């Protein structure tokens, strides 16, 4: 199933290719060289170019090497961090926070969302509140969380949970509420009871929507984690980046930033894969990729 | 000529399978202006017997309550009055003695074809091995063995309806309820599926109650046609179709055209065709009458 999705992605990428084919005068030689490498490498080409420029600018003095150290220095800095174990100290703390907050949020949001989607009148009462909570900027609430939970771990976990919960909740409710009534009718006609209906029809039908919520929630929780660690903390990846900046350990600071970017991309990629695997039956996947 | 279609005399040896007795169905609808509710009578005093093993089609103008009638029979919605019995037992909800096929493609999109066909069996907790055997059998009957592992979105409309029929047959109901199952299909696919359905019906001996908009389809399939009128929905005519089976190629025949015209006239004047229907000069009428034993 996932191969099909990959095909679809290629198909979407293709119009660019065919466009250059139709208009041969406009096609550059570099396009011809890169063509066989496919969309995958074209995406990476731009990253390699940026890395190259990053290396060149400080090296040739076009930019102050103190503000932007050479890329190679950043990589060296990262390996030093790995060797001294300093990186893992912060990494482990962050992972512990984000997993309790994120999974705690899921455990709260998915069951409640199913319940609210099922009992539509209940949902009508609560919906404005949920929308208000979701749309309030999380970080403005952080002082309140610190007030309530203190400066320790609890406030951080709680705010990550907060940032995960609402988007997952809304997507779960939407998924459950919008199950095609024809499918429910068809199952009911076979004498299916409430629990079986929930398990065999509603949940599978709502899965794509729930997974989308989880993906958005995961992205949120990484952002919130880092911000929370930067505001009031003495450990974690967010703190680490600030700490290095304050200590003028600029290559290490950049290493932290890049690592977080890669972590975000990786989580997103994994969840997209899971999403397309679990929802390969979804017609949309043919037309829109992912 | 009138003997091509006959009044609803109980045919010899016919066993009643389904009884509709004084069916009432009323919906509460909001009044158009202002508050309060109106009672909207969808079905009024509807009486009908369906015989075991027969193919009954329901025709009637849009909104006359055909789907409502089928939903009631399926036990999906409550009656406002009267009762429905199957084999003498009052029905009080959905059960697997009835299988339902709808117009919309109601396949579970996250299950492949085989799992869709097995859905009812899973509910019944039939062991896996047996399930496989049954779904294999019905997929073969509808000619989709090669598509067992496909997902619904990978099928054409006709294939989807074949799967839906296989799914409804798989848990071995006694009655098959079909609500315009072929309405969304193109004419050619529709005719193919009609023949396949008749074939399945003959093989399995199920009682079929089939709703359709198409007079042509109703005549082609039916042993009997129940003609409904609307406001409130009620039975105006019950017509025995005495065309011989198999009916492939009969659509162009004069007899077929005559019956189709007759049903059409019933639908035109709700009262049930008091105007005489002109003779159409059909030859060998007697032959046609005799070639089909009643039921
Ligand atoms: N839940 C409901 N609430 C109120 N009125 C309803 C409801 N369901 C159906 N009706 C009304 O009952 C009448 C019969 O509906 P039904 O769907 O049975 O018609 P039908 O004969 O199947 O029509 P069609 O041929 O268009 O499918 C319609 O006038 C419809 O508006
Ligand atoms: Mg209908």
Image: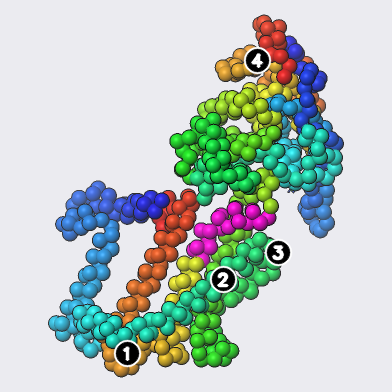
Whether pointer 1 and pointer 2 mark residues with C-beta atoms closer than 8 Å, the reply is no
The one of A205 and A8 positioned closer to us in this rendering: A205
Note whether ligand 1 is within 8 Å of mark 2: no
Q: Residue at x 51, y 73 (%)?
A: A103
Residue A159 in magenta? no
Where's residue A218, x and y in %? 46, 71
Give the main secondary structure, helix, strand or loop, of the magenta stretch. helix
Q: What residue does disc 3 label?
A: A121
Label 4, label 1: how many angstroms apart (C-alpha)? 91 Å
- The image quadrant of residue B178 is top right
Note whether ligand 1 is within 8 Å of mark 1: no
Q: Secondary structure at mark 1?
A: helix
Mark 2 neighbour class, 10 Å CA radius: few under 14, some 14 to 19, many 20 or more: few
Query: In the rendered image, is residue B173 in sight?
Result: yes
Q: What residue does disc 2 label?
A: A107
Where's residue B134, x and y in %? 56, 37
What's the magenta region?
Answer: A194-213
Q: Residue at x 22, y 69 (%)?
A: A48
Marked residue chain, label 3: A
Residue A244, labelled with which disc? 1
Marked residue chain, label 2: A
Dot 4 and dot 1 within a common chain: no
Q: Report whether A65 appears left or right of A91.
A: left
């Amino acid at each position: 199933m996932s191969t099909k999705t990959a095909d679809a992605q290629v198909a979407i990428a293709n119009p660019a290719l065919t466009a250059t084919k139709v208009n041969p005068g406009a096609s550059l030689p570099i396009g011809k060289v890169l063509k066989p490498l496919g969309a995958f490498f074209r995406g990476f080409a731009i990253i390699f170019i940026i890395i190259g420029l990053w290396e060149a600018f400080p090296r040739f003095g076009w930019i102050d090497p103190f503000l932007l150290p050479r890329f190679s220095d950043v990589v060296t800095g990262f390996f030093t961090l790995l060797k001294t174990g300093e990186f893992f100290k912060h990494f482990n703390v962050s992972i512990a926070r984000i997993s309790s907050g994120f999974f705690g949020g899921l455990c709260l949001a998915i069951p409640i969302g199913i319940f609210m989607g099922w009992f539509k009148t209940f949902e009508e009462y609560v919906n404005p509140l949920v929308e208000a909570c979701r749309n309030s900027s999380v970080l403005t609430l952080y002082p309140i969380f610190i007030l309530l939970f203190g400066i320790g771990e609890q406030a951080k976990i709680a705010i990550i949970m907060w940032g995960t919960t609402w988007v997952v909740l809304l997507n779960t409710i939407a998924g459950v509420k919008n199950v095609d009534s024809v499918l429910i009718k068809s199952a009911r006609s076979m004498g299916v009871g409430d629990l079986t209906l929930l398990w065999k029809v509603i949940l599978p039908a709502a899965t794509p929507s729930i997974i989308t919520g989880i993906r958005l929630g995961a992205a949120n929780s990484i952002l919130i984690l880092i911000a929370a660690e930067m505001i009031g903390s003495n450990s974690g990846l967010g703190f680490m980046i600030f700490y290095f900046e304050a200590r003028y350990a600029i290559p290490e600071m950049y290493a932290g930033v890049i690592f977080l970017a890669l972590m975000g991309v990786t989580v997103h990629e994994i969840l997209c894969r899971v999403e397309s695997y679990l929802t390969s039956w979804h017609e949309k996947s043919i037309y829109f990729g992912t | 000529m009138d003997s091509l279609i006959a009044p609803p005399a109980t045919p010899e040896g016919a066993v009643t399978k389904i009884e509709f007795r004084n069916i009432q169905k009323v919906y509460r609808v909001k009044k158009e202006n202002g508050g309060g509710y109106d009672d909207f009578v969808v079905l009024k005093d509807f009486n009908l017997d369906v015989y075991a093993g027969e193919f009954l089609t329901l025709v009637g103008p849009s909104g006359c309550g055909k789907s409502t009638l089928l939903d009631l029979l399926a036990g999906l919605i409550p009656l406002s009055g009267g009762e429905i019995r199957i084999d003498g037992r009052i029905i009080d909800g959905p059960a697997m003695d009835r299988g339902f096929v709808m117009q919309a493609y109601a396949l579970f999109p996250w299950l492949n074809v085989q799992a869709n066909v097995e859905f009812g069996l899973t509910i019944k907790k039939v062991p896996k091995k047996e399930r496989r055997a049954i779904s294999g059998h019905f997929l073969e009957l509808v000619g989709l063995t090669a598509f067992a592992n496909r997902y619904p979105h990978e099928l054409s409309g006709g294939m989807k309806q074949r799967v839906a029929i296989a799914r409804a047959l798989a848990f071995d109901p006694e009655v098959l309820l079909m609500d315009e199952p072929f309405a969304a299909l193109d004419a050619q696919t529709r005719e193919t599926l009609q023949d396949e359905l008749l074939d399945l019906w003959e093989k399995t001996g199920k009682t079929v109650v089939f709703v359709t908009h198409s007079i042509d389809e109703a005549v082609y399939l039916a042993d009997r046609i129940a003609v409904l009128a609307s406001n409130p929905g009620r039975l105006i005519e019950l017509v025995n179709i005495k065309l011989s089976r198999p009916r492939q190629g009969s659509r162009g025949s004069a007899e077929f055209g005559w019956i189709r015209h007759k049903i059409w006239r019933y639908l035109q004047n709700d009262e049930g065709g008091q105007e005489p229907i002109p003779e159409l000069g059909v030859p060998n009428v007697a032959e046609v009458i005799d070639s089909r034993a009643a039921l």
